[in-house]
Image: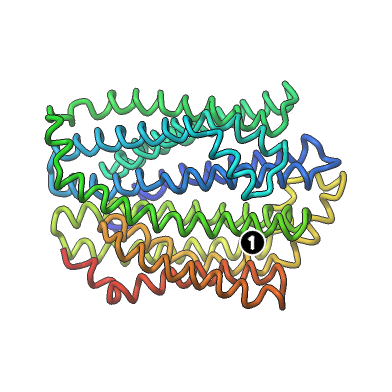
Amino acid sequence: MKANREILRLAIPNIISNITVPLMGIVSTAIAGHWDSEHSAAVIGALAIGVSIFNFIYWNCSFVRMGTSGLTAQAYGADDRAECTRMLVRAVTVAGVLGMAIWLLQVPLGQFALWMMNGNEMVSDYFYARIWAVPAGILLFGLNGWFTGMQNAVIPMCIAVTVNVIHLACSFAFAFGLDLGIVGIAYASVVAQWSGVLLAAVLLLLFFRHTFVRVAWRDILDRQMLRRFFSINGNIIIRTFCIVIVYTFFTAISARMDEEILAVNTLLMQLFTLFSYMSDGFAYAAEALTGRFTGARDEASLRLYIRRCIMWSIGIALLFVSIYLIGWRDLLGIFVDTTRGNAAELIEHAGEYIGWIIVIPLAGSVPFLIDGIMVGATQTRIMRNTMLLATAAFFAIFYGFHPIIGNNALWLSFMSFMILRGIFQYIATRRLELIYRV
């Protein structure tokens, strides 16, 4: 019971934090679909492309969170307050430099992204409005990774809820009140993300100022620790880049099929994203606990907590299978006004592919959790290598079956990608035995 309580102590706030992210996507999609309901497919498609571009940016920068979380958790488990402090400074410094670099390069990055994603003027307006939120978003990666490593999931939850409430309010005000449409949604993200950074700074000083110790810059910039930090993060960058390539390819190919397929796949991906962020709550708990017990050299606790996390993850997957099996029409109806335009036809068309969404939670639950375990144990080389294999399989399956089964091939390859990443990691760690050797 103690293990379950500890897992839920970390998982529930992370679930609440994570669930606000797809809810923000759901609200944004719903606003886009209702803002111009006569052309809902075109507006939803433009938003999907714009969001996909920023997912590409953010996911490729998520190494700041994951690298920080695992190393901080290990320092926490070893009761090394000085290294915990140094990890915070490293994370904020790297995040700040990276965020400013992307903002300064917004023009060439934007032009390339719009060309790659076949984006129109509506997508362009969205991109150049939302780019101002990127430095704040990356800073939040670093700060939330540090909070997670310090075994505190409540502060990231408070930040996430605040950010998304502000985003929701501003999206309605800007999109409808100022009639800015999806550009208004982009500006809402800017306001929300910077508000989150401000709140994170306040909470950091309020709750952790007594944890900090004085550290020297020469220790922060210690060559050996920096080499380890960037080695871990380098592997995570490659691993994350593979995920981004798969997700971006998914949207890009959907857009090249036709406008209706793009809208249908976008709607269905909202349901998958809802599950994935819920499941990631337990992955984050596994990440924090694995790092903590690895740092403390406590193999018995590590084995126990990993087993319990796997059980919880499978339970969440079964819950979502049931929800999607029974209520998928009602869930899709949230995104569009079914009484106007072609929205009702979109939902009917989505029904042709709903079977993939019903099955995917079972395919993705354990792989998501193993990712968290790998981050906590800083076994990032294995993450990198196995993700490269799963990505290669994704493209092989898609191009092999697309001429035969069309859009179903995209979903088949995506589901296979989910399954294979977990299988490959399980095999590469010799049934997780390499993780247990602390």
Residue labelled with disc 1? 324
Q: Looking at the picture, how far across and down is residue 142, in whole percent?
A: 34, 38
Task: Indicate left or right for 223 with 334 as reference.
Answer: left
Q: Is residue 116 above or below residue 100?
A: below
Number of residues whose C-alpha sits closer than 10 Å to that of mark 1, classed few (under 14), some (14–19) or many (20 or more): many
**Residue 246 lies in quadrant:** bottom right
Q: Residue at x 24, y 29 (%)?
A: 208
Q: Name the residue nearer the viewer: 353 or 317.
A: 353
Name the one closer to the observer, 216 or 365.
Answer: 216
The N terminus appears in which quarter of the rendering? bottom left
Residue 162 versus residue 329 in the image, above or below: above
Above or below: residue 95 compared with residue 70 = above
Q: Is residue 5 visible?
A: no
Instruction: Tell me if residue 170 comes above or below residue 278 in the rendering.
Output: above
Amino acid tagged 1: Tyr
Q: Position of residue 286 (x, y in %)?
A: 33, 56
Q: Position of residue 180 (x, y in %)?
A: 72, 27
Q: Is residue 366 visible?
A: yes
- At 58% from the left and 75% from the top, the residue drawn is 397
